[in-house]
C-alpha cells in the first residue's frame, strides 16, 4: 500500500498483493485522493479485500474536512469513493482508524479537535459493501484510537479517554450483528501515571 505523487497532481492511493513466492502482483489504484491530504488508513481482510479511508482538508473542501472511504474486493475491483457524513462536525488534527473483517464489515473511526475543542470518537459502519452509516458517538473524549476486526463481522477499538493529559485506556466493541459500538469499558489496568 502506498501513495504515489505526480509532479502537479494529488496522490494516487495504490496497492498490490504479494504472491506465495513473494513477488509483487498487479498494482491496483484505489483512487486519486485530492489535496491537501491529512491522513490515510487501510485494512486488508483474510480474503485479500481492502478497505481504505482518508481525510482531506483545506479550502477545496470547505470549512469541514472531507472523510472518504473505498472498498475493493479480493479481485481488486474497487467501488466508487464514498464520502462519510458523521453526526458531529469534525475539525483539525483528525485521527482515522479503519477495519475490514472477513465477513465484509468495514469501519471507519475518527477523532480529533475542532476550534480547540475535542469532538469525541465517532464511527461509521459498512456491512457487506453497503453504504457507511454513522453511529452515535462512542466517547465524547475518546482519542488516539487503534482498531481491529474481531471475528467474521465485528470490530474492537481501544482508545484514550478523559482529555489531556490522557490517563485512562478504554475499549468498545462492534458485535457481529450490531448496528453500533458498545458503551466504552475502562481498562481494569492501573491508570497511566502522571507525566
Image: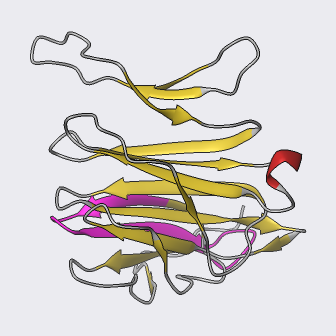
Query: Which quadrant holds residue 63?
Result: bottom right
What is the quadrant of residue 129 in the picture? bottom left
Quadrant of res 12: top right
| Residue 35 in sight here | yes
Nearest to the observer: residue 178 or residue 10: 10
- Residue situated in front as seen by the camera: 187 or 127: 127
Chosen colour scheme: secondary structure
What x and y, as percent, mark residue 175? 26, 80
Q: Quadrant of the N terminus?
A: top left
Q: Is residue 123 above or below residue 97?
A: below
Rendered view: 32 above or below 19: below
Seen in the picture, residue 188 relative to 20 is either above or below; the reply is below
* Residue 168 in view of the camera: no
Looking at the rendering, the stretch of residues picked out in magenta corresponds to 146-167
Residue plotted at (22% across, 20% down): 18
Which residue sits at x=28%, y=60%? Answer: 149
Q: Give the x, y percent position of residue 122.
A: 57, 74
Question: Could you tell me residue 191's position as x and y percent?
Answer: 54, 75
- On whether residue 2 falls in the magenta region, the answer is no
Q: Is residue 162 magenta?
A: yes
Q: Quadrant of the C terminus?
A: bottom right
Q: Position of residue 193 (x, y in %)?
A: 62, 68
Residue at (47% x, 62% y) in the render: 108
In the image shown, does 178 or 79 lie closer to the viewer? 79
Residue shown at 68%/37% (left/top)?
34
Amino acid at each position: 500500500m502506498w501513495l504515489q505523487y505526480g509532479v502537479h497532481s494529488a496522490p494516487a492511493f495504490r496497492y498490490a498483493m504479494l504472491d506465495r513466492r513473494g513477488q509483487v502482483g498487479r498494482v491496483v489504484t484505489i483512487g486519486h485522493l485530492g489535496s491537501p491530504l491529512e491522513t490515510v488508513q487501510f485494512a486488508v481482510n483474510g480474503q485479500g479485500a481492502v478497505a481504505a479511508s482518508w481525510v482531506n482538508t483545506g479550502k477545496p473542501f470547505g470549512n469541514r474536512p472531507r472523510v472518504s472511504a473505498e472498498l475493493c474486493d479480493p479481485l481488486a475491483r474497487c467501488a466508487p469513493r464514498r464520502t462519510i457524513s458523521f453526526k458531529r462536525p469534525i475539525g483539525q488534527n483528525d485521527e482515522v482508524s479503519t477495519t475490514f473483517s472477513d465477513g465484509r464489515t468495514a469501519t471507519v473511526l475518527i477523532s480529533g479537535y475542532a476550534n480547540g475543542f475535542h469532538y469525541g470518537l465517532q464511527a461509521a459502519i459498512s456491512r457487506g459493501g453497503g453504504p457507511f452509516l454513522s453511529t452515535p458517538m462512542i466517547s465524547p473524549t475518546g482519542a488516539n484510537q487503534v482498531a481491529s476486526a474481531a471475528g467474521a463481522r465485528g470490530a474492537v477499538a481501544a482508545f484514550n479517554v478523559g482529555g489531556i493529559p490522557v490517563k485512562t485506556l478504554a475499549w468498545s466493541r462492534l458485535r457481529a450483528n450490531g448496528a453500533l459500538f458498545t458503551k466504552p469499558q475502562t481498562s481494569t489496568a492501573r491508570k497511566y501515571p502522571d507525566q
